[in-house]
Amino acid sequence: MSEHIVEMAKALVKVKDGIIEVLTDPMIRRFPLRDELYGCEEESRETIKNVLRKHIEEFGMYSPNRVLDRVPIFISSDRL
């Protein structure tokens, strides 16, 4: 049994045993990167749920089956 509390688009979200519950409304209306990656023109509880569902299905996020080596991680040199 696992439970995670995360924030996405400034909304509080609980993921428990693969079940996603968006606890608060998103405070960010538009996030250009998410629009580009997931087609989310405007953030809502439903878009948050859909994106998290994709993270769970594609990468096993919030589960013991998570895969982190498929996604390239970029670090800006000014952060080093």
Image (spheres, rainbow, N blue to C red):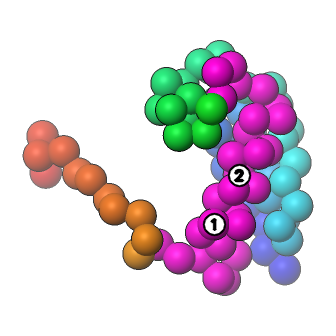
Taking the magenta stretch, the answer to whether it contains residue 64 is: yes
Which residue shows up at 66% across the image and 83% down it?
Answer: 64
Which residue shows up at 34% across the image and 62% down it?
Answer: 72
The amino acid type, in three-letter code, at marker 2 is Leu
Residue under circle 2? 52
Above or below — where is 11 with respect to 22?
A: above
Q: Residues within 10 Å of mark 1 (few under 14, many from 20)?
A: few
Determine the image quadrant of residue 24. top right
Label 1 residue SS:
helix
Disc 1 vs disc 2: which is toward the camera?
1
Magenta residues span: 40-68
Residue 12: x percent and y percent?
A: 74, 39
Determine the image quadrant of residue 70. bottom left
Compute the Cα span from label 1 to label 2. 10 Å
Which residue shows up at 27% across the image and 53% down it?
Answer: 74
Which residue shows up at 83% across the image and 35% down it?
Answer: 46
Taking the magenta stretch, the answer to whether it contains residue 65 is: yes
Visible in this render: residue 55?
Answer: yes
Residue 2: x percent and y percent?
A: 79, 74
Q: Which mark is residue 47?
A: none
Label 2 residue SS:
helix
Side of 36 where 42 appears, left or right: right
Quadrant of the drawing holding the N terminus: bottom right
Above or below — where is 1 with respect to 16?
A: below
The amino acid type, in three-letter code, at marker 1 is Glu
Above or below — where is 57 with respect to 31?
A: below
Residue under circle 1? 58
